[in-house]
Amino acid sequence: MDYIIGIDVGTTSTKALLYDTDGRIYAKANKGYTLYQDTPDMAEEDPDEIFNATLSAIQEVVSQSQLTDGKVVAISWSAQQHSLIALDENYKPLMRTMTWADNRAERYAAEYKQNGRGMEIYKRTGLPIHPMGPFYKLLWLKNEKPDLYKKAAYWVGIKEYIIWRYTGTLKEEVSMAAATGLLNMKTAQWDDVALKETGVKKSQLPELVNITNKFRGIHSEYAKVMGIDDDVYFVMGATDGALSTIGVGAIDTGVLAINIGTSAAVRTFVDQPRIDPKARLYCYPIMKGKYLVGGPINNGGIILNWAHDSLFGAEQEAAKLLDIDSYDMLSKIAATVPAGADGLIFHPYLGGERAPLWDANARGSFFGLNRKHTRAHMIRAVMEGIMYNLYSVSLALKEVSGEPKAVLAAGGFARSKLWTQMMADIFENDITIPESYESGSLAAMFLAKMALGMEDDLADIKKYLGKEHRYQPNEETFERYRKLIPIYIRLSRDFSTEYKDIADYQREFTNDK
């Protein structure tokens, strides 16, 4: 029996799943690491901490499985988008990883939005005008950290760095390259205009390959630690956005995929580049005839984590004593409040926001708070606010790609029946949840099978999805949500005139501490 490991390098942790070639899961591991946020706009990670997390996760799943009847033949990768690391001539990091959530390039994104050059870059690369993009991070580093910028021999993302650590091979697959804002959307080659703007040379960037590119061989010291052979195949894989979409079976044009992890997104595949005239959506080439169009959201499950830690400390202690999951307890508390939270609205912009606002200065708020409202209303409003935000992104996506034929969803949120039902009610659409909610790792495994010649049609991933759970909308809630969502959207526009001032205030006084 042969085995494949699917790795998903996320924002706060790395997951490893060990599959056999029939798609059965034999072991799982999840290893966390620190997101450094020393200032309101910083969001960095230590690339070597993440590398060590992948090493530990792989070692754990191999050890758990005690593979006496076969061996691991391939390791395939999913990873967070928009990360950036400067390497010296010996491929050593000169900095921590700037993640997608790092907003320090906000001023440069704002300038490019105002002078029209941002729209030009968007039309060429599909990257929205926002500091998440390495294109804008490079402008910030060039101007604010010139010494570091000049020392950089190579510019890579976290996945490219990790694979180089294991193998000594520096490559970048097309889907990850597209998310940098340096790749031409139509040619799938490094874009001359974007490179000229940033001052980056093609020689400073990895070799471009497709998402099923494979190569053999791993440094023996790492193979020994992990308990695998050093001739294992490494399969490049793709971005977490692409693989989360593939991994729920949203292969066909017109099928909407929604994922809520730490962040969140609404996405769909199209067969040719689609540009949103308002630049609210990205458009990235993934493979021949497949372009991913969607809107990424900063504030997904991380907002529920904030509410869990900041508002419900006592309940966490009670959950420990009762030996129950504290997040399940939050769902039960939220379920005691009617849909619409009795008119309490929450804007979940605690870390700025990408789609649909594309405003790194955006800040969160409760609106409509009165004496009747309790913490139960607040947690319900938090859960609903995240869904309202996703729904508003789906409205933009409908303008570009049309009415969805179906809505598929995955991510940790799917473990909450309340939250999933909430999605069905707000979207007024059936929501289908595949049994395997680890969609990124599953799709990484499937790409490895394609790379090894075991599969040849992307659509065949559907046979690995297992049973489907379908949530149908409850018509009794329609009127409540239909009246609240327009208020939610209008408020986000009204507040936008004040976001910069409050963000500047926070930067000034937080930095003084």
Image (tube, rainbow, N blue to C red):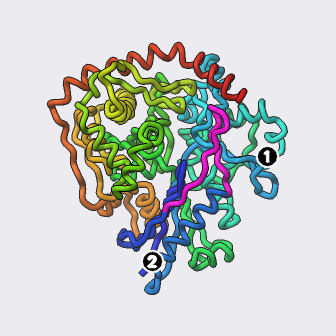
Q: In the rendered structure, does residue 40 fall within the stretch colored magenta?
A: yes
Q: What residue is disc 2 on?
A: 65
Q: In the rendered structure, does residue 334 fall within the stretch colored magenta?
A: no
SS of the residue under disc 2: helix
Residue 211 visible (yes or no): no
Q: Residue at x 54, y 33 (%)?
A: 351
Within 10 Å of disc 1 (Cα), the crowding (few <14, some 14-19, many 20+) is many
Within 10 Å of disc 2 (Cα), the crowding (few <14, some 14-19, many 20+) is few
Image quadrant occupied by the N terminus: bottom left
Residue 223 visible (yes or no): yes
Boundaries of the magenta span: 30-48
Q: Position of residue 192 (x, y in %)?
A: 68, 37
Sequence order check: which comes first, mark 1 or mark 2? 2
Q: Position of residue 37 (x, y in %)?
A: 63, 39
Of 52 and 219, the residue lying toward us: 52
Query: In the rendered structure, which amino acid carries the disc numbered 1?
Result: Ala
Quarter of the rendering containing residue 202:
top right
Q: What residue is disc 1 on?
A: 152
Q: Is residue 229 above or below residue 181?
A: below
Q: Residue at x 77, y 31 (%)?
A: 144
Residue 144 is tagged as none
Query: In the rendered structure, which amino acid carries the disc numbered 2?
Result: Ser
Q: Position of residue 364 (x, y in %)?
A: 48, 26
Query: Does 69 sit left or right of 89 as displayed?
Result: left
What is the distance, in whole Å, between disc 1 and disc 2 at their CAs? 41 Å
